[in-house]
Image (cartoon, helix red, strand yellow):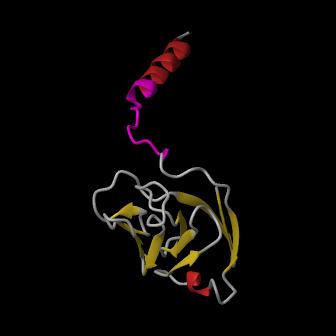
Amino acid sequence: MKKFITLIICSAVVLISCSKDDWNNQNPYLPEMAVNVPINTSLPTYNTLNYPGNAIYIGGYGINGILVINTGTGIRAFEATCANHGISSCSKLTLEGIEAKCNCSDALVYNLYLGLATTDAQYPLKEYRVSQSGNMITIYN
């Protein structure tokens, strides 16, 4: 009986100590798109991803393509559409080194190491999952 009461008290403490996260990761501007992109870094097109600090743009997937970066601690992949605007001709991001620039009037700039805007913005870039096995990288959601 003592163990049962201890278990109930511990469970209550854990539940009470958990706080609700106010951040909403559902982005109202970007619809969900199925993505499954295999990348072979042995190929010349993707070879730069073998080296930290390099980023590439891959068109034809997601909404406006995918931005992929080797951060030195792993590969990260993001939707190439500004996360803080509705989908339009200006919301396609332009890759500039390790940053992605929105072409809309507020010209938001996102750091690809973090996926965050360099100025105040409500939403981070939409990130895709990445798995890596040898020279093969798969980007998916």
Residue 128 vs 132, above or below: the answer is above
Residue 112 vs 31, above or below: the answer is below
Residue sitting at the far left: 119
Residue sitting at the far top: 1
The residue that appears at 58% across and 61% down in the rendered structure is 63
Q: Where is residue 137 drawn, in percent x and y?
A: 67, 71
Residue sitting at the far front: 89
Give the side of residue 125 with respect to residue 57, left or right.
Answer: left
Please state the extent of the stretch shown in magenta in the rendering.
Answer: 14-27
Give the side of residue 130 with respect to residue 80, left or right.
Answer: right
Magenta segment: does it hold 16? Answer: yes
Q: Quick one: 53 or 13, which is closer to the camera?
A: 53
The quarter holding residue 16 reads top left
Quarter of the image where the N terminus is located: top right
Q: Quick one: 94 or 67, which is closer to the camera?
A: 94
Magenta segment: does it hold 44? Answer: no
The residue that appears at 40% across and 55% down in the rendered structure is 84
Overall secondary structure of the magenta section: loop
Q: Where is residue 108 drawn, in percent x and y?
A: 34, 65
